[in-house]
Image (tube, coloured by chain):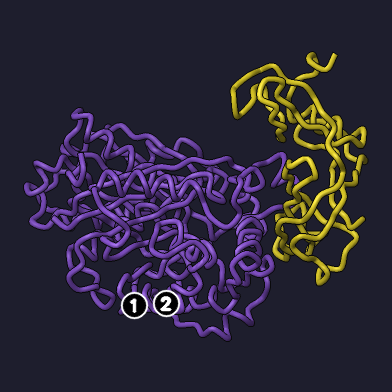
Chain colours: A yellow, B purple
Amino acid sequence: MSEVIPFTIEQFYKFIGERKLMSAKCNKCGLIFVPPRPMCPECLSNDLSWTQLKNKGKLLTYTVIYVAPEEFQHMAPYAIGIVELEDGVRLPGIIQNIKHEDLRVGMELEVDFDTTVQSTWPQWPRYFFKPP
Amino acid sequence: MRGKPLAAVVSAGLSKFGKRRGLSGRELFAEAALEAFERCPNLDPPKDIKMLIIGNMSESFEHQCHSAPIMSDWAGLLPTPAVRVEVACASSAAAIRYGVFMILSGLYDVVMVGGFEKMTHRATSEATEYLAMAADYPFEQWNGATFPGLFALMATAHMHEYGTTEEQMALVAVKNHHNGALNPKAHLQKEVTVEQVLSSRVIAKPLKLYDCSLISDGASCAILTKPEIAKKYTDTPVYIIGSGHGTDAIGLYERDNLTSLKATKIAAKEAYEMAGLEPQDIDIAEVHDCFTIAEIMAYEDLGFCKPGEGGKFIESGIPMLDGELPINMSGGLKAKGHPVGATGVAQLYEIFLQLTGQADKRQIDGCEIGLTQNLGGSGATCIVHIYRRG
């Protein structure tokens, strides 16, 4: 049935609302890619399926944002980073439950979910990163 | 095609950059246009100029879409057709590129290119939000990423991989503020010290206030002609001899390399090949120092030094005004200011002044070849142009 689920950003975040980190996988060349999209960015095939990603990875880089857009001002300062998951997929996200001075490139982080936001464009449930 | 003039720049204009209270984008553009017309008395603007291409990033600042016809009108060019192009902060470099293509097509002999942005009437949080719209919405903006934040992610990675330091980044700010202090059109005309940069407030760690370019108001323009007719308009044309454009994934997280911008490398390669030149042939450059780390990465990606050695390159003094390869003589986005849509053509303006000996206190003697590098967003777009003195 997976082939009838559209490879869209809305669907990615619907899965996040179900506390699942899902990626598109190309059945032709094997590439795993986020954001999902209607065709493989590598071989342009539209023979795709959904695959669940592991919720663990390592921090490639980070920053702590002090000057924020209005919507995020109440959170500032907050940490964001890019995490490479064990499957090789990279995601940007907010890093929670950590003292900012403890952030290190290469540290292990895991993915957690905030499902309190309803999934309607352009508002989605969130995934975020935290120490294991 | 190698080294052949693609188009000539026969005139250019730049509004004063800064907090231009009470002026909107169209009035700033008129200011730039007037300078370009005054520089070029043989030009009959509404008759000679066949097309106007305008770079402008965001209609949010002025609540105004469809700005191209307004600019044609305020520059006194009606009914000259006008179009707006948008690739975030590289919008007006794109205007140059498509102006060059129009000349090359043979359809038009004279076209005007330019850009503008009116920003300072907005609160910093609003401006931050509007600028962040040039980042990927569903993954970057939704997770609170800002432009300082995205370049801070590159800075952290560069520091981790190559040992680049906050002091080296501060030296870029010190250099560009020094140059900006010599530019009467710069937004900030004051020197800063390494200590001032390092002790300024954190915007997105490790980037501090003085690592960041300015939110500015400003406009820029240039008159491009077919090379064969340039001398009809000026004795000292500048020729565009290379143009390159690189495009990459919009999300920083989607790119393999966090310490280098592939779009810059692609754009530079195309421009160098078209010009038949190598990085060592460049005499002067204006690069996209939206943040100090971006200038350090530009040194590397444009081939002025090896990957990872951008920090040492600024320490060496090579890119200083009196160095072997002066970079951002104008003060750059850092001190001259960064009205985003105006920036690409503002870089051209500085190269035009330098190659025609009109840069006054910051004039580099004997320069022949200039390069501009203009980024869009966090590097999904890069446009490079190479210029030669006529």
Indicate which disc, 1 or 2, sits on the residue closer to the N terminus. 1
Q: Amino acid at mark 2?
A: Gln
Q: Amino acid at mark 1?
A: Leu
Instruction: For the N terminus of chain B, give its image quadrant.
Output: top left
Q: Residue at x 31, y 49 (%)?
A: B272
Label 1 residue SS: loop
Residue B149 placed where, x, y %?
Answer: 66, 59
Q: Residues within 10 Å of mark 2 (few under 14, many from 20)?
A: some
Residue B191 placed where, x, y %?
Answer: 45, 82
Q: Is residue B20 visible to us here?
A: no
The answer to whether B211 appears left or right of B333 in the picture is: right
Residue B360 placed where, x, y %?
Answer: 23, 75
Q: Is residue B183 above or below residue B246?
A: below
Q: Residue at x 86, y 68 (%)?
A: A99
| Disc 1 target residue | B182
The answer to whether B261 appears left or right of B369 in the picture is: right
Q: Quadrant of residue B162?
A: bottom right
Residue B16 placed where, x, y %?
Answer: 37, 64
Label 2 residue SS: loop
Q: Of residues B187 and A128, which is closer to you in this image?
A: A128
Q: Is residue A16 visible to us here?
A: yes
| Disc 2 target residue | B189
Q: Quadrant of residue A60?
A: bottom right
